[in-house]
Amino acid sequence: MTDADPCPGDEPDPADHDSIGAPGEDPMAERLEPLQAAARQLIAAARTFLDAAESVVDDPEAVTQVLTTVADTAQEAVRVAARAGRRAAQAASPGGTSGGSTGGSSGSSPDEEDPGDGPVRNIPVG
């Protein structure tokens, strides 16, 4: 038997389907209300975004600051990725450090090879 063929004696329970067949109720309207509410929230969010975008466009200094911040962030991301790539390559190479320890065959930590790559530098202690 399939789901379309109910078993004999298995009658649908009207209590299981509150909105089906209830007089004066529109089941489609009940399903539409949450979608309308979500659409209204999306429109409100879009308006807020557009207001913020308009204020940035109206102030050229703000545009410069935003672009500078994005560029600085991108440069730092490139530095971090390059540093991580060097560490991974060093760990994978024969005689390289393993597990992030600072005691490899070269005797220096990966951070010591990049002294000017950022505002934070790990200093080995002990």
Image (cartoon, rainbow, N blue to C red):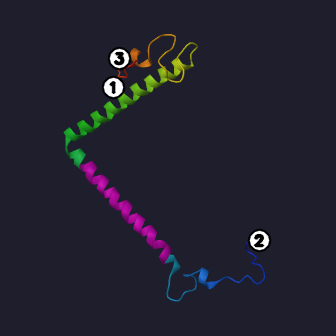
Residue 123 x, y percent position in the rendering = 37, 20
Q: Residue at x 22, y 41 (%)?
A: 62
User: Is there CB contact under 8 Å for labels 2 and 1?
Assistant: no
Label 2 and label 3: CA atoms lie apart by: 71 Å
Label 3 and label 1: CA atoms lie apart by: 9 Å
- Please indicate whether residue 71 sits to the left or right of residue 31 in the image: left
Which mark is in front, 2 or 1? Answer: 1
User: Mark 1 — residue?
Assistant: 120
How many numbered marks, from 0 up?
A: 3
Which mark is in front, 2 or 3? Answer: 3
Residue furthest out toward the front: 126
Q: Amino acid at mark 1?
A: Val
User: Mark 2 — residue?
Assistant: 2
Residue 9 x, y percent position in the rendering = 76, 84
Q: Quadrant of the C terminus?
A: top left
Q: Secondary structure at mark 2?
A: loop
Question: Which one is earlier in the sequence, the residue at label 2 or at label 1?
Answer: 2
Q: Amino acid at mark 2?
A: Thr
Residue 11 x, y percent position in the rendering = 71, 84
Q: Residue at x 28, y 48 (%)?
A: 53
* Residue 117 highlighted magenta (yes or no): no
User: Mark 3 — residue?
Assistant: 115
Q: Amino acid at mark 3?
A: Pro
Q: Residues within 10 Å of mark 1 (few under 14, many from 20)?
A: few
Q: Residue at x 30, y 57 (%)?
A: 47
Residue 90 x, y percent position in the rendering = 51, 17
85 or 54, nearer to the observer:
85
Residue furthest out toward the right: 1
Which stretch is magenta?
A: 29-54
Q: Residues within 10 Å of mark 2 (few under 14, many from 20)?
A: few
